[in-house]
Amino acid sequence: MPGPATGPGLATGPASAPVTLLIADDDAVTRSGLRTLLAAQPGIAVAGEASDGIEAVEQARLLRPDVVLMDVRMPRCDGIEATRRLLAESAGPPKVVVITTFENDGYVTAALSAGASGFVLKRLPVPQIAEAVRVVAAGEAILFPAALRRMVAARPLDGAEALPKAALTEREEEVLRSMAKGLSNPEIARSLMVSLETVKTHVGNVLAKLGAQNRTHAVVIAYESGLVVPGYTG
């Protein structure tokens, strides 16, 4: 599986403040390993840990991290419900990156629909997981289109009517299709031969019209609605 795509200028430079991270995983060994390895990555500062969804919400409220690396299958409160609760916070909720063992885990699409900014696999090299954290903190999304296509095809979510009701313009649909291919805003601007500011405006309009919490959620809706179908590449 390829690593996350990044747009120009998304990597955290040496002079930038580190991205603060909360790690939520019910397995103590996994949690400890991730903390040790990610803390050694440039631009990452691990603020804390949580052993289940309830603790993740509590620690996020206390520590105010930039990003929560959220396991899905946890006791008391799973990562989906924890994500939903976190993003319901009114005062600057953290970004959420789902971390999972299997890319066809049906829970992942539900977490994306709940507002997670993307997902990574536990088997990925630690530098790739760290880069995913940095990219999400910078306001982008972590999209693996092929895996997302497979998951949505296997387990459709509710909300397939969201796109028809949104009345997107032709250009907004074009931008949404480009987002579904995993293109960053600068890449979409080059592809459509428009300015970066124009793309940002279109992306904002798409998210607002769809009622999507982020671009990953918008892409899930695009697949569900049939605007983009599994196997789409063009």
Image: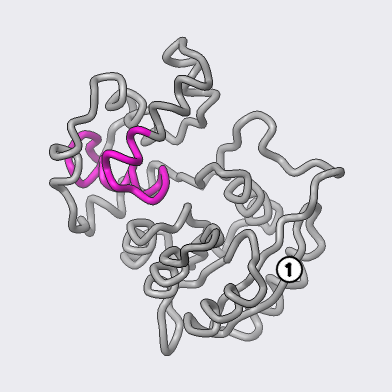
Q: Residue furthest top?
A: 193
Residue 27's image quarter? bottom right
Number of marks in the image? Answer: 1
Question: Residue 91 in magenta?
Answer: no
The relative height of residue 65 versus residue 142 in the rendered view (above or below) is below
Label 1 secondary element: strand
Residue 3's image quarter? top right
What amino acid is found at the position of numbered circle 1 in the picture? Val
Q: Position of residue 178 (x, y in %)?
A: 38, 28
Q: Residue furthest right?
A: 15
Looking at the picture, tell me which residue is in the foreground, 125 or 45.
45
Name the residue rendered at 70%, 79% in the picture.
Answer: 32
The relative height of residue 207 versus residue 63 in the rendered view (above or below) is above
Q: Which residue is label 1 attached to? A: 46
Q: How is the image coloured?
A: one colour
Specify the quadrant that holds the C terminus. Answer: top left
Looking at the picture, tell me which residue is in the foreground, 226 or 203.
203
Q: Position of residue 24 (x, y in %)?
A: 57, 75
**Horizontal side, residue 119 vs residue 39: left or right:** left
Residue 168's image quarter? top left
Q: What secondary structure is the magenta-colored segment mainly?
A: helix
Which residues, given as a range, are shown in magenta? 205-230
Q: Position of residue 68 (x, y in %)?
A: 58, 65
| Mark 1 surroundings within 10 Å by alpha-carbon count, few (fewer than 14), some (14 through 19), many (20 or more) | many
**Horizontal side, residue 16 vs residue 229: left or right:** right
Looking at the picture, tell me which residue is in the foreground, 191 or 128.
191
Name the residue rendered at 48%, 56% in the picture.
Answer: 119
Q: Residue furthest bottom?
A: 76
Question: Residue 227 in magenta?
Answer: yes
